[in-house]
Amino acid sequence: MDPLELLRRTDKWFLGGGKGAIYAPPFPRFLTTPGFAEECYLADIRIPRMFSVLILDSGSNPIKFQSSVESWRPDRLILRHFAQGIQVRETRCVTESNAWASSFDVMETTGPLHFFQWSLLDVKPAGFGTPWTSLTAAEAHDESISARIETAWPGELEPDRTAVEAEHIGQAKASMMPSVPVFLEFGGSAPRRSWTINLAQRHDEAPLYELSMLPTKFRDGKLPGDFKLFVGPQPLEGMAHLLQHYVVEPNERLVLACGSGMSVESARASLRDALEGDVVSESEQAWRAYFASVPQFSSSDPWLTAAYWYRWYGLRLNTVDLEGLPICQESVSASGTTFSPFVTEGIGFFRNFITYSAQAHLREVSWMHDPSLAQGILQNLPKCQRADGSFPGHNYSARPPRDFYHADFATGTSQLEKLHGIEPAPSVLNALASYVAYFYRNRGFGSTYYLYAIFDQNETGQEYMSRYQVASEQAEQWEAFRVGGVDASTYFVLLANYLDTKLDTIPTTTLSFGSEAEDVLYSIRDYCWDSESAFFCDVLLNDDRSPARPATGFYALLLSDMNEPDRWREMIDRWLPHFWCESGFPATALEDPTFNSEGEWKDKRLNCPWNGRSWPMTNSHLVDAISNVARVTKDPKLYVTAGEAVMKAVKLMFHAGDPTRPNSYEHYDPVTGVPALYRGYDDYMHSWIVDLILRYAVGVLPGKDEIDPLPVDVDWIECTDIPHPRGRMDVKIERGKEPTVIIRKGT
């Protein structure tokens, strides 16, 4: 199995090095322009334009190329640039040391070519912004140009509820938080011929020769070497042109790169790493080493195999492991803490530590041979925790945290322990205990029963659905309400039960976790269960069971302690057909009066609707719920249903059902399978896929010697190097044969 070749295609362009630097514009306008002409990110810091590359012929005339993408793999993007008598091949990489690098091979030319690395950066006076981002320092060195970009956000924002980057300054407070600097270092692998740094009044940002300084500055084969940055009339603002000039002969190679980091030294080291050696080969080696660090999976089913390896690609693409990345606290006096490694929810707007997705990332990366990334995710919980014990939903480097999400941290934490034999750190256990206490103090719902309350439609990561409208007609306006949630209460039971096994190792606690879990479990079983409709319902303020039928009703089936097999079977038999569409599982039952598979709420297409779209996060929960019932009841029919559910959740995430074109969007049409293309957010890590495949298709029971695979209707599956407390587990499954399991000692 060669994951890089398996994932090769021509319709992708996202690149990342697994540490924080990423190139992933959702809708690129200048994809085939040489260099990285559009937005890039270092962790959650957006850099609108990294650098483009202008190429002039030997007579100093701009070359008008016809350019196209030749191929993409996770480790590189190859493009071809053609003009009359000239051919240049470009290979783009984002390195493990956080550099953006373009390697140019001059394949054909009538003479030497002039290459110009051109960065166009904003210069703004200190002030307000959402965010305010500006170049605040630059310097020309012997063979490079360094730059410092600072980013700051207001201390209070009106949260954006459209899931796009369009924030508004809050009314109560508009003062800016301290800025976070990012350092950049631009350079090339060949001797630099000339350079210039100039400030210009604002103009079109397209990477065109006509908009650059070249028509006026490039004379007699060189740039003037002048530094004119913080100049001109007040206010000192505009667009900084950073230009460096290189000459390339026929059949020569030139690498142009920008290194980055949270310090001057790290940015320079990043550039040096990109320019010394073969950056393309090193990017390939880094990706191959990463793919070798996870369980090795292959099968006779091309969708299953592609989904497995594509998810591992997405996890590394979105990993942030950046030394010195600060955590912006709600109180400036609490600053000074830095992030441990984590996985972002996705690209763009979702490029931050989001706790609702952290539960998914934890489950996925717990399968890696090295548990460090999973441990880093857990370590960030106490670092981000609020004084009341809750975890902010979104956590950033330069921007105050916001929101709150209900989440299941118990399953991933327990799984990490079972796979690697590693107890969670005391600080993590204490943070989780404080999180339980937060619910006990602040989220109780009911007087004769005990559930946990949802206060607004954002808290479950699910917006615009009848589930919330029946609680309040103003829910869609983001006004507060209260409803006893099946999902919120289920997550609580899972965590309280887990912590009850850790009483001896939790540093400080006064809660009786087992008793709390039992009370809530009783309430789910006796108050949420509607015997007439055979469904687990949310509970409204008047103690009525909600008439809404969201997929979250199935989440109660994750609670093995409930031990109600008859109820479980009845609910699955009666309700699963109402959530079983041709391509996926909708988040709201088909019969719901608001149901719409096309993303429309009240006839208007929305960015994140849950009234009929198929969300991979919900699909992951449903597969877990159905599979849990199958395993507890040992019902052969349910085993088949659960196996079919696994494959439905997996096969949804491909363009037009093509096994060579996997994807991972926010949501899909459950009937046609078409993803939310209009959002542009592919490689969105808001679900668990690797985890489903390993636990159900392979059948791994974390920490145990035996396996329990579901019938997923494939001829064979082979998976080796699976973490096991005694070393590694190898599994082979063939149709019509007994599975084979080998446990090898060591690591």
Image: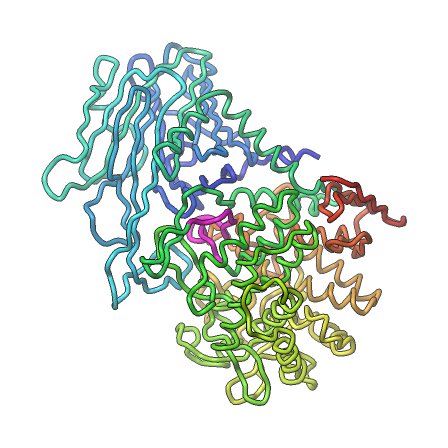
Q: Over which residues does the magenta segment extend?
A: 338-354
Q: Is residue 165 left or right of residue 318?
A: left
User: Which x, y percent locates residue 511?
Assistant: 57, 74
Furthest toward the left, the residue is 233
User: Which x, y percent locates residue 555?
Assistant: 64, 70
Q: Is residue 427 left or right of residue 230?
A: right
Residue 450 vs residue 255, the one in the foreground: 450
Q: Quadrant of residue 492?
A: bottom right
Q: Is residue 350 magenta?
A: yes
Q: Is residue 299 left or right of residue 15?
A: right
User: Which x, y percent locates residue 142?
Assistant: 29, 19
Q: Residue at left 64%, top 79%?
A: 524
Instruction: Identify whether 57 is placed above or below 685.
Output: above
Q: Is residue 628 magenta?
A: no
Q: Residue at left 59%, top 86%?
A: 449
Q: Quadrant of residue 101?
A: top left
Instruction: Identify whether 66 is placed above or below 404.
Output: above
Q: Is residue 244 visible?
A: yes
User: Which x, y percent locates residue 232?
Assistant: 11, 36
Q: Is residue 299 visible?
A: no
- Location of the N terminus by quadrant is top right
